[in-house]
Amino acid sequence: MPTAAVRHVIHLELTLADHDPAIVREVAIDQDLTLADLARVIPALFRGPLCERHVFASSPGSLRWSPLRRRWGDRRTLIDLRDPTLVDEATARIRSVLRSGEPLVFAHTCDPEFAVHIAPGRDDVVPAEHPAVRILRGERAAPLTCSRSPFHHEVLLAVLDDAEHPCSPALRASLAAAVGPWAAYDPEQFEPAAAQDAIASVMDEERMPSYAGPLEMLVASLPHDARAGLRTHIASAGLELPAVVTADEAAHLLRELTWVLTAATGPGVPLADGGIYSATADEGAERLDTDPRHVAALFQAARSLRFMYVRSGRIITKKAVCKALGDPSTLWNLLADAVLRAPICRDHHAQSLVLLAIADGSAADPAIGFSRAADAFAIIDDAHSRGWVGHFDDEWDGCDHRCDCPRIGGATWHDVVDAAIEHAARAATSDGSMTLAERNVDHRELAGPLGWRSERRMTTAAPSSADLETASGRNEPVFLREASDLIQLLSIFGLARDVNGAWSVPPTLRQLARTALQGRRQERRASRATHHFF
């Protein structure tokens, strides 16, 4: 009988160094993988520094060289450490390195505060269909990406546990912004499914294609700590499943637009003062049993969607669109693609977020509406505007790890933690004494590099309650103003708002939004791009 395909794995207990209470992950990893694979998994499990500069070592600390010392890394590690005995991690099999049962340490060479202890456990044999790296258990949530030290995380936990602390409201609001509107930060909660998804995102090449769809691009535009929440939301809402719409439903939604596009075929429709003649509007109103102003809005919508062009004072339907007029399914796909990619809004993220709120049903929920989309737009806008404001550099010296945490009242969540440290330092020196950090010009031992704060360290106070209320209350009006052109365009397909502020979304429009978000895949581009197209 043929032997069943199996996978030989080893259990590893990974513990984030110097954290109390301990933050632990246990994984089963294929013994044929290399340390280079493990180097991708560990930061994904612990939200480690985004910079890829790292080293594996046979013992913690920087012990003096001896023939028994072993270190593994890549070419950047060799440049950092200048160690000719460094072993290429891509050639070091898990089976060989951990055969002796001795523990390893994974550390970030730029940031000495980040280290993970690796304790090998028992060998096992599992079915081959199991993933190459499988999460077995975990304890507590990992620190956020920009948590600069165990002490920094310790202060965060203490402030969260103390509801009376003056920085508590600001920290909770800042953390909520950091993880995004589709997630909540609970330091005691470990989510195995999210951890496994994080592993898959760095191990499975099929999950990292050269071409990405609109939903993937939207996730990539968020700050790093907010991406997991949106990925989970997309999966739970089934937004990656095909839209369900019949040909009759598509034809009904497209009936008015089809008439407008048909009327402008051939020689087209003459323009007067930038709009259509009243005779054309009256004819359309009679044919469609509607108001002439609505017909004029239909023509304007078709132009915004780039379905028409103007030549010699006439508006003419494009040839590619003319070919789709007899096929509701083809025209449906053209419309779905256009509402996402046409430059309707000044910022293309607003278009994606409007369609997301419609597709997942939150826009039609009176308790939510476009509030989540507005909060997401605010943190995307904050992250993308960093390069245009005159703040200090926000990265470690010589390191690729940049901070993209959103700000409330001008401060990020780690600014608030630093403010809590400052409050404690002032209380400890109320008798006229002085902390050692105050005597150190750089303050690096306490508060990290200068640019991690929105202003100079040890001088920024936490945002006030008024700052928090103003920030949370203005996101949705700002977003609706930014997305007003798309919302007005979608109103011709049934999107409406009642006197109480609740939104009405026809089921067919919701399916159109789903189709748009599942649109044709585009080559990945930098998340800081400001053009309208993906």
Image (cartoon, grey):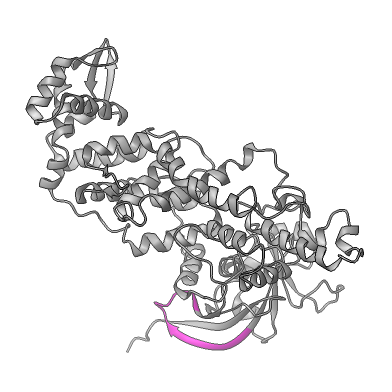
Query: Could you tell me residue 219's position as x and y percent?
Result: 46, 53
Q: Is residue 167 visible?
A: yes
Q: Is residue 446 above or below residue 57?
A: above
Question: Which residue is rendered at x = 71% and y = 66% of the image?
Answer: 152
Magenta stretch secondary structure, dominant: strand
Query: Could you tell me residue 253's position as x and y percent?
Result: 16, 41
Query: Could you tell me residue 173's position as x and y percent?
Result: 56, 59
Look at the image and say whether residue 395 sits in the magenta stretch: no
Going by the image, does 35 lie left or right of 126?
Answer: right
Q: Nearer the viewer, residue 15 or 445?
A: 445
Going by the image, does 17 lie left or right of 266?
Answer: right
Question: Which residue is rendered at x = 29% and y = 53% of the image?
Answer: 364
Image quadrant in which the C terminus is located: top left
Question: Which residue is rendered at x = 11% and y = 35% of the image?
Answer: 326
Query: Could you tell me residue 469's position as x and y percent?
Result: 54, 52
The boundaries of the magenta stretch are: 120-135
- Residue 305: quadrant of the picture: top left
Q: Is residue 278 above or below residue 326?
A: above
Q: How many marks?
A: 0
- Residue 428: quadrant of the picture: bottom right
Q: Is residue 435 above or below residue 9?
A: above
Going by the image, does 520 lie left or right of 150?
Answer: left
